[in-house]
Amino acid sequence: MSGIISSELLAPVDIIIDSREAAKNADIVEGVKKKGLRVAVIALNVGDYYLLAAENKQPVLVERKTIIDLANSIRDNRIWEQVQLLREAAAKENAQPILLLEGSFYSLTKYTKWNITSILRALDEITLKYKVPILPSPNKNATIQWLVAKAKSLGETNKKRIIRLRVEKKPMTLNERILYVAEGLVGPTLARKLLEHFGTLRNIANASISELMKVEGIGEKRAREIYAIFNTRWQQ
């Protein structure tokens, strides 16, 4: 899989929104449309919003995360690959990468066990090591307002120009593919625990219900679900 997306937009567009992001946040799509932005929805390999720009200005590639999204991606160590890919993709397009962080740190630290220091250390790395600016946004409405204001500040794209977006994503390593399969069974947190306990996907598939229940966080119901996945005949 090449991982290259190349989309030609014959109609003038101000902002490209990733199709998965659009499906999850239709209110943001409608919000920017109501404010007058010309929108295209396309599946992007990297980033959630691509703000196009006039020829004399720099486009912006935006990765949007809620505070909870950020915490989960830090826990699973996905954040570092995501930030690196965001930076590389933006560089290829001569675009400015931005991590838009939506929500309140207060709710994260109040209702979860996260320590604010851990979050700030991750933001420190993203900003200083990876050179990706972080833009705080209190809520979706503020995100919409910023997207509209920023897009308008970048100027209108040339109506006669074909806009070509090329974003490259590195193919997953074998280790990442193994984790990806395990995550499909039980989600990112338990997937790591399963692999740490059993070592291979084959061992997980061959495990009994009682053996699966020895993994922290795997109760009888979840163990039976995993067992059924590997031991039920597939039907068309």
Image (cartoon, rainbow, N blue to C red):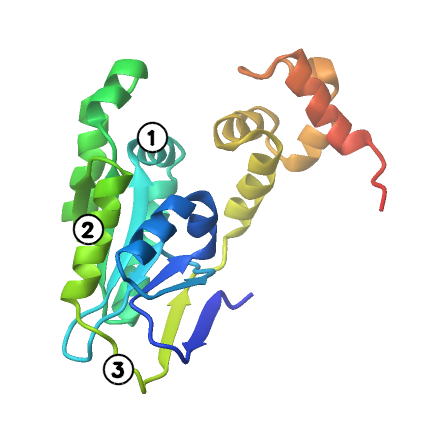
From what the image shows, is residue 26 above or below residue 150? above
Dividing the picture into quadrants, the one containing residue 115 is top left
Instruction: Name the residue at 68% across, 19% down.
Output: 223
Left or right: residue 179 compared with residue 205 = left
What's under tag 1, amino acid-wise?
Answer: Ile
Using the image as rendered, state which of residue 66 and residue 155 is in the foreground.
155
User: CA–CA distance between discs 1 and 3?
Assistant: 38 Å
Hey, what amino acid is under mark 2? Trp
Residue that protrudes farthest toward the bottom in the picture: 160
Identify the mark nearer the N-term, 2 or 3: 2
Q: CA distance from mark 2 to mark 3?
A: 22 Å
Question: Left or right: 230 with respect to 143?
Answer: right
Q: Nearer the viewer, residue 224 or 212?
A: 224
- From the top left corner, tell me how far across and down residue 74 is, in percent: 33, 34
Which residue is disc 2 drawn over? Answer: 146
Identify which residue is drawn at 28% across, 40% down.
Answer: 140
Going by the numbered disc 3, the residue's amino acid type is: Asn
Q: Which residue is mark 3?
A: 158
**Sequence-earlier tag: 1 or 2:** 1
